[in-house]
Structure formats: structure tokens, C-alpha cells
Image (cartoon, coloured by chain):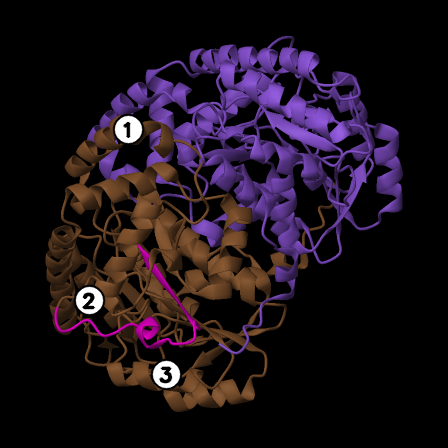
Chain colours: A purple, B brown
């Protein structure tokens, strides 16, 4: 073809960091702190054998057929009660829609809300997969100051007052990706107080909330939402397995209804068989007990990583001590570039994600994200030692 | 919320006909010719039990984990050779991307190609699910005259000359949805000759091609494509099962690459487990033999429907005699409205899709689509008798 005239929006899509990461992590020699992959050795494979046999025996013809856009009703029911129990929401199954990963919710919420040049507010830094989803709709990003306690309410108010085209706020209040930080209850309340004065949709992404190592689960933003402004996203990817691509959206009224139109146009519905399988698993086994096993392992890995960082990293490097989730976040001295550091580390067969990619408006190249869920303790120790060495080399 | 300011494009999304259809067909009392559902009693459930057990045993940790956006390499390899064998293409696995149903390809190709007000050319009528996918990107639709032999080349040339903003042509040359018609080889060649003179992308959707009751499989448009202008879509939904949501796109160069960016932003990747399962099924069983069983059943159902229509419908009603696929298409006298007819039929517990929905620019309300794959012969006979009665009532 002489020229294929792509849509304007395609200028926002370039070879992505995530894709590059997924390729690096496929090499089993690499000690990878780069992805956000759950530990595959914890997938409930034996249980799934039982589950699938039973689903195919009992419901095979339905589980393999087309199904409704909203998702399998018994599973939606279970999700609603689980969310209410964990996050103090008051959801019914009619608020729940099954999605093909939470990534699909991010894409379709972008499609629902963003006209060219509209503003999306986000934490600084924020999840880069959300940015790649929203990018298709040409937003402008405004990063709102975010500290160790969450998004700073005064900064949010200031941004909402200034940005007349603000349409959505994207946040991850629990074990944030990439920083591993969690908002305090006070900050959650203050946030909801600010947004109550603006016509804006809040996208509360919570893939990691159940993976809490200690302390109380704080109430979700959605639990304070009396006006249907908050869309809460959850997923089975981190508490069960990502390979089934089953996640969910919790929303109200118009937002829920319009999301269903977009979902139907995007892929008709999410995999029926996976929905039946997860539903049967929850009936036949104890998902809470499974999550407790994950927590046990991830907590140990997190501790090993943090303790090794304390020993191996120069004191000029600061980092998050997470209370849960999959990530910690390190800030190097400002003279260092994490992208350059990564090149050194890849020679040592260690990978991580340079933090700059998580700041939609650039900068902060002295930061990096480290995942601890996907490597056994001995490889975490070795990897952090090598990373520490590399940092020291770069400091010289 | 006082007001949620949705994006402009949301005005194109209304309660959809497909959704309404899926709801009607959920009532087991209804004799439904409405959906496009495969016969669930033919799903290879027993074989799948073996397949899943083996996949989980052998590859459980990989099959449940995140995977690459392009899809599982061995399955892409198999699809490439299958397409080459069936449709005279020369594809390699690097041309194949796994998608979450073909619906996802339609959505993402719309996103890739269409700016506000760009033109999409299509057959008249065309698949309404494609329209709902493209609608998100605000196209204008130009219906190109289509007769019993396919799209009319002179009409296509005329439209391409006139429409400077034409970006894509969407066609279903094999057992078209909704008409059940198949393009002749001559029309395929003439079509490719015309489009060779324009910078335009052809979306060739082929979900039904393997379900051929008689005669030779014609070469795909993609088999004549020397410039990478044709994107060919295939799916396991009609030859295996739709509940896994596994389909594929065949494309070249820039289009393939940009599709991968969009796919990653839309759902990261399609279900890993389903991809492993289908791959193992093809290794362990004979997919061609399975398709032969489907053809046997659908051919009988089609014959029963057509023979009953010949007897029960007034001679003023014309209809397609399909050589394969899932649908026939009836044209009523111009004074009748298929939407009104549907209301009468629903009282008689018979459903179909009024044809007007398949014409993006409206009109043709005297047409209707009938599906024969999802009902046993005795219900097809009864349903067509009732439909014939209803037509006669409306003619009085």
C-alpha cells in the first residue's frame, strides 16, 4: 500500500514500555522485578482441574456459548457481596459488570468520558497501562501532587478549579502501582469531600487491595460515594489468575448503562467459560483461604526485598515499605537515570521498570519500580545485590 | 451526580438491537431464529474435558499467567496454516494476532482508521455488530450496491471516486451476515482490481466460511492481496465455541503493528487458558472432522428451513438459498414492516431480526434475517409455519 491513512489518535501509540517488559521477562535467566506478575506456582491448578471437570459436566453447553454482556449472574452476585464485605460498599449484582481484565474498563471508561483535549487527573506517578488505555482518546493529563498519605486534597481542589475540562480522576488508593503506597482514611474522606463539589467521574482502580500484609483494610472511595460518581474496578488477576482475563467494574446508573453499550461493541462479552470456572471455584473452595496463602508468600518476598535493599542500597536511595500489593518504589539521587541503570542491570541479568514511564508529563527519571511477587526469595536477594552494585557503579 | 458529561461519541450508542435479541432468545419457550448462535449440543464437551485436564497438567502455570499481546505462538502457527489451506492465503504466524472475539478486531480497526466524519464503505445490508463497533469513532457509512454475486464493482469504483474521506471497506464475502449470500470468484477479483487504485483498507470478515454445505471454497480477498491492504478476520466461535472468545486477525506490516498497540491498550491480551485449550484440542483431535459434523447438522437445518419456507411463505416473499453459514434473508412485499411482523411473531413465540437494522442509513424495513443453526428441525418447521401465518395475517 502506498500509504495507509491512520486515524489521528494513532500518533499517541508507540512501542510501549509494558510490551518491552513482557518480552524481557520471558527470558527465564533474567531476575525480573519488572512485570506485575503473580507467582504462578501459587495458581490453584489442582483445584481448577476439579472445577473445570464439574463445569463442563454440569453446564458445558452454557459455559461454551455466547452469553450476556453484563456477565454471569451468579458470579456478579458473589462479586457484589465480596466487595461489600471487603471494602464497605453497598453494591448489588446490578452494579457489577464482568470485563476482560481491568484494562478493558480503563479503555472503555476513556472512550465513555474523554473528548479530544479533555483533562484526566491522576496521581503522580500513576499506572502506565491506564495511560496507554486513555491515550486512544487524546486527553491531557494533569498530575496531582501525591505524598505518602495519598492525593493531596488542596492540590486536587486547585486542579479542579483551574481545569474546566477535567472529566475524570484516575486513582489507585490501595498499594498503588507503581509506588506501593496506600491512602489514609482521612485522605480518602478529604478526597471525596473535594470531588463532591465537581461534576467529575472518579475511577478507583483496586487490583491489589486484598493482598494486605498487615493492618486494617481502609474503606474504598466507592464506600463514601452517594452520587454514583465513583467507578470501582476489581480483578481476579491478582487473587486467582490473570490468564482467564476476568475482572469487574462496579458502577451506577448512566455510567453502568453506557459502559454496557461500549462493552458490547468492544467484545460482546467476556469469556463465558472462565466466568463459570471462577464461579464454581468460589462455590467449591475457599477463595479467602487461597488469598491468605498468597499473602503469606508475598509478604515474605516483600520483607526479603526490603531487608536486602536496606543492606545493599546506598543510603541516598529511598524506597516505599509497602503494607501489601506487589510493588515497591525507589528514588535514586537526582543525578542518576534509571533508564541508564536498567541498561547496566540487564547486562547483570536483572530487570525493573524505570519510573519515568509512570509520569505522564515526563521527568522523574531517577525513580524505579520493583516487583517482588514473581521471584523466589533467593533470586530476590541476588537481584537486589546486583541492583545495589549497579547503583553504586552509577554513583561513582 | 448532577450531570455526567459523557464524550460526544456516546450519542452514537443507544440500547442496541443485538442486546434486545440476546434477551429474547434467553427464554427457552421462544423459537428463536434471531441470534447467530451455534448449536450448543455440538460443542465438543467430552473432548474438552480431556483437553483441559492435559493443559492444566502440562502447562498449568503458563496457561493461567499473563501472556503476550499477539497470542500463543503455537496456536498462531496453526491458524496461519489453516487459513492458507482453506483460503489460499500465504500467511505466517507473524501475520496472526489472537483477539477477544472478532468483535474486538472490528472495534480496534475502527479505532485505528476512523477519524470523526471519515467514511466506511460496506455492503448493503451489512453486519450490525460491525456498525456498533465502528460507531464509537463517528464514521459516515456509504452503502455500496450489492447483488446476488457480491458487491457491484462499478458501484464501488463510483463510491471510491466520490468519497474522498473513504478510509475502510467492510465486507463479509462468505455466507454474508445478514443475507447468507457469497461473492463469486469473478466479483472478488473485480473488487481487488478496483481497490488496487485507492489507498484504502479492506476488512474481510469471515466467521462462517468453513461452514460450506456444497461447492468449492472460493479464494479469500486476502489471497489476492499483494499490498497488505486486506485485513482478514477469522474466529473459533462458529467452528469450535464462542464462549472462549478466541478469534484472530490476519494483517501485514504497519496495520499489524498498530493493531498490537491498540490490542494491548484494550485488554493486554486474550485469555491465555482458552488459547492453550484450543491449541491442545487441535493437537489431540481432528478439528476438520468436528467442522464436518457441524456442516452436516447445519445443512439439514438449512434445508428444513428453506423447504418449509417454500411451502409456508406466500409467493410474494423472496429469500436466499444459502450454500453455507448460519443465515437466510427474506424480502417481504414493500408494504410490510418486519418490525411490526416481529411483534405479531413474539406473541406466537417466534423471534427473528428485522432487516432494517442491517442498513446503516435506514430503510428496507420489509426485510428480515433468519438463523437456522440454533434450533432443532421440528422447531424450525413449527417456527416457519407460525412465521408464514403471521406474514399472511399482515398481508390481509
Return the x and y of residue A306 as percentages of the image width and height.
64, 14
Q: In this view, does B36 lie above or below A325?
A: below
Q: Which mark is residue B33?
A: none
Query: At x 23% / y 81%, what residue is drawn?
Result: B316
Hey, which residue is sitting farthest top in the picture? A215
Instruction: Name the secondary structure under disc 3.
Output: helix
Q: Which chain carries label 2?
A: B
Instruction: Name the secondary structure under disc 2.
Output: loop
Query: At x 20% / y 29%, what residue is drawn?
Result: A57
Return the x and y of residue A141 as percentages of the image width and height.
76, 46
Look at discs 3 and 2 and give the one toward the viewer.
Answer: 3
In this orientation, which residue lies closer to the viewer: B386 or A288? A288
Return the x and y of residue A64 as percentages of the image width and height.
28, 41
- Report whether mark 3 lies on the same chain as mark 2: yes
Horizontally, residue B204 falls left or right of residue B7, namely left
Q: Is residue B236 visible?
A: no
Q: Is residue B334 visible?
A: yes
In this orientation, which residue lies closer to the viewer: B17 or B334? B17
Q: Pointer 1: what residue?
A: B56
Horizontally, residue A67 falls left or right of residue B53, namely right
Return the x and y of residue A209 as percentages of the image width and height.
59, 21
Magenta span? B214-236
Q: Distance from label 1 to label 3 (Cα)? A: 46 Å
Residue B231 magenta: yes
Are circles 1 and 3 on residues that touch, CB within 8 Å?
Answer: no
Residue B47: quarter of image: top left
Q: Residue B191 carries which label?
A: 3
Q: Distance from label 3 to label 2 (Cα)? A: 22 Å
Q: Pointer 2: what residue?
A: B324
Horizontally, residue A147 falls left or right of residue B384, namely right
Indicate which disc, 1 or 3, sits on the residue closer to the N terminus: 1
Amino acid at each position: 500500500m502506498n500509504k495507509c491513512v491512520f486515524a489521528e489518535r494513532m500518533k499517541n501509540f508507540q512501542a510501549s514500555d509494558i510490551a518491552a517488559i513482557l518480552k524481557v521477562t520471558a527470558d527465564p535467566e533474567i531476575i525480573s522485578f519488572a512485570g506485575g506478575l503473580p507467582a504462578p506456582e501459587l495458581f490453584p491448578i489442582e483445584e481448577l482441574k476439579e472445577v473445570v471437570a464439574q463445569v463442563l459436566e454440569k453446564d458445558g453447553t452454557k459455559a461454551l456459548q455466547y452469553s450476556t454482556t453484563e456477565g454471569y449472574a451468579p458470579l456478579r452476585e458473589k462479586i457484589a457481596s465480596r466487595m461489600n464485605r471487603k471494602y464497605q460498599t453497598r453494591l448489588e449484582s446490578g452494579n457489577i459488570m464482568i470485563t476482560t481484565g481491568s484494562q478493558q474498563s480503563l479503555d472503555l471508561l476513556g472512550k465513555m468520558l474523554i473528548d479530544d483535549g479533555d483533562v484526566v487527573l491522576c496521581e503522580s506517578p500513576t499506572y502506565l497501562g491506564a495511560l496507554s488505555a486513555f491515550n486512544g482518546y487524546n486527553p491531557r493529563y494533569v498530575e496531582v501532587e501525591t505524598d505518602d498519605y495519598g492525593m493531596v486534597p488542596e492540590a486536587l481542589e486547585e486542579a479542579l478549579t483551574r481545569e474546566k475540562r477535567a472529566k475524570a480522576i484516575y486513582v489507585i488508593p490501595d498499594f498503588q502501582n507503581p509506588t506501593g503506597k496506600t491512602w489514609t482514611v482521612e485522605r480518602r474522606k478529604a478526597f471525596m469531600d473535594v470531588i463532591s463539589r465537581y461534576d467529575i467521574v472518579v475511577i478507583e482502580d483496586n487490583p491489589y487491595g486484598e493482598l494486605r500484609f498487615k493492618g486494617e483494610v481502609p474503606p474504598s472511595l466507592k464506600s463514601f460515594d452517594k452520587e454514583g460518581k465513583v467507578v470501582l474496578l476489581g480483578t481476579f488477576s491478582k487473587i486467582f489468575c490473570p490468564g482467564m482475563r476476568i475482572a469487574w467494574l462496579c458502577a451506577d446508573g448512566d455510567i453502568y448503562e453506557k459502559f454496557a453499550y461500549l462493552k458490547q461493541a468492544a467484545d460482546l462479552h467476556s469469556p463465558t467459560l472462565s466466568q463459570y470456572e471462577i464461579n464454581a471455584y468460589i462455590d467449591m473452595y475457599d477463595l479467602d483461604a487461597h488469598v491468605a496463602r498468597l499473602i503469606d508468600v508475598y509478604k515474605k518476598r516483600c520483607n526479603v526485598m526490603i531487608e536486602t535493599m536496606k543492606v545493599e542500597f546506598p543510603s541516598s536511595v529511598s524506597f516505599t515499605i509497602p503494607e501489601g500489593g506487589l510493588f515497591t518504589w525507589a528514588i535514586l539521587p537526582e543525578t542518576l537515570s534509571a533508564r541508564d541503570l536498567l541498561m547496566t542491570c540487564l547486562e547483570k541479568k536483572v530487570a525493573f521498570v524505570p519510573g519515568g514511564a509512570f509520569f505522564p508529563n515526563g521527568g522523574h527519571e531517577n525513580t524505579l519500580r520493583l516487583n517482588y511477587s514473581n521471584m523466589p526469595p533467593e533470586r530476590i536477594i541476588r537481584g537486589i545485590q546486583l541492583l545495589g552494585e549497579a547503583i553504586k557503579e552509577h554513583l561513582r
